[in-house]
Amino acid sequence: MTSDMSLEDRYTVPGRFWHRLDDGRVQCDVCPRACRLHEGQRGLCFVRGRAADQVVLTSYGRSSGFCVDPIEKKPLHHFLPGSAVLSFGTAGCNLACRFCQNWDISKSREIDRLADAAGPEDIAEAAVRLGCRSVAMTYNDPVIFLEYAVDVAHACRARGIRAVAVTAGYATDETRRGLFAHVDAVNVDLKAFTEDFYRRVCAGHLQPVLDTLVHLRHETHLWVEITTLLIPGHNDSDAEIDAECAWIADSLGPDVPLHFTAFHPDHKMRDVPPTPPETLTRARRIALGHGLRFVYTGNVHDAEGGRTFCPGCGEAVVERDRYVIGRYRITDDGRCASCGTAVPGRYDGPVGRWGARRLPVAIAGVTRS
Ligand code: SF4
């Protein structure tokens, strides 16, 4: 079979986590899709495939673009608040969400047109140069480009820059351990709380995502926050939100921040209306009722839903207007400035003042670690 993939290509590297099947195919074990590949075939994510009789990654060092963002945009509210993060992604995705808000990247079949080439060292050095405290792998899921993601994380850590993964958590146990052990913070997109939604809307399954969350929370020391995009009529019923929050409280504990964010019509769901702000407020109330301590609303202006409250004295220790931090009452080592109670998260010095700016940047050069 003629293939467009080759290890001679400078962006193609041998892949991890796969095995041979008795019928001559090879199976990719990076995510629960378990794509079974003949020579020359690509997996559903498009960036992994079989070449030279092995599974390869074809997007190592190729990016869909770089941008300096506020860390609150990932969203991470308890991780180096106010700091700048250098964000990037590649192409492809291992889910097929009908509402995808990054579908031009995640469903791209044109990786040759990916604009920016950059190796791990280039990215880490750019983060230092740009005054970023972390690098986020965010526009599509680092699960599918884990070899690149791990090398970026290593290069960053070597320079004192933290690594952040924004992920749907749709991964096998091997990938969870092989990827997330190398990063410092993760935001997991928990897309809904029914198997029916995952199957019908995302062409995936719920349980592997829950397994990822339990692994991250109980078997690692990295910082974890969760985001659920509420889509009218699809995952926003009281019963479903109630079930999700009960599971988080029981399985992960009350200190994992939860962000309810607003949907806007996109991709194959242009017939669904935007999420009313009242839906986010209702969801937040349900979550607080389950004892979750840090529940936020996102993609809207909502003073109450943007506040962090001290778990000790109840004072509003951080006030936010979307990505902009206003009043800030947390000490440099992460304690309430009034009562001294530790606020869960990762704090390291004074609050950053990056604000809401979004700064696209170009990063030249390709170097492999
Ligand atoms: S990572 Fe890609 S190739 Fe591997 S199983 Fe998942 S979708 Fe298939």
Image (cartoon, rainbow, N blue to C red):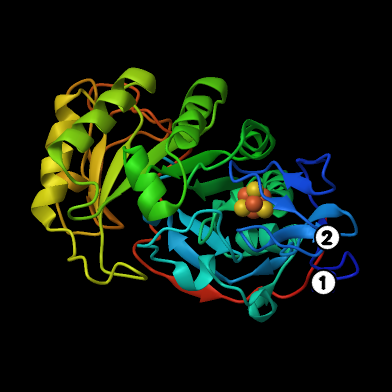
Ligand 1 lies under 8 Å from the Cβ of mark 1: no
Horizontal side of 235 relative to 88 (left or right) equals left
Residue at 25% of width from left, 66% of height from top?
Answer: 264
Horizontal side of 86 relative to 306 (left or right) equals right
Measured as percent of width and height from the top left, residue 57 is found at 75, 58
Circles 2 and 1, Cβ within 8 Å, touching? The answer is yes
> Can residue 260 be seen at all in this image of the molecule?
yes
Q: Which residue is mark 2?
A: 39
Local packing at callout 1 (Cα closer than 10 Å; few below 14, some 14-19, many 20+) is few
Residue at 54% of width from left, 47% of height from top?
Answer: 165
> Can residue 78 be seen at all in this image of the molecule?
no
For marks 2 and 1, give the CA distance: 8 Å
Tally the numbered discs. 2
Ligand 1 lies under 8 Å from the Cβ of mark 2: no
Residue at 74% of width from left, 59% of height from top?
Answer: 49
Q: Is residue 182 above or below residue 361?
A: above
Q: Earlier in the sequence, mark 2 or mark 1?
A: 1
Horizontal side of 208 relative to 81 (left or right) equals right
Measured as percent of width and height from the top left, residue 178 is found at 69, 36
**Numbered badge on residue 3:** 1
Measured as percent of width and height from the top left, residue 177 is found at 65, 32
Q: Is residue 168 above or below residue 68?
A: above
Residue furthest front as drawn: 23
Q: Regarding mark 2 in the picture, which secondary structure is present there?
A: loop
**Numbered badge on residue 282:** none
- Nearest the viewer among 341 and 265 is 265
Q: Mark 1 is on which residue type?
A: Ser
Residue at 58% of width from left, 63% of height from top?
Answer: 92
Measured as percent of width and height from the top left, residue 308 is found at 24, 38
Where on the picture, by quarter, is residue 101? bottom left
Quarter of the image with the N terminus is: bottom right
Q: Mark 2 is on which residue type?
A: Glu
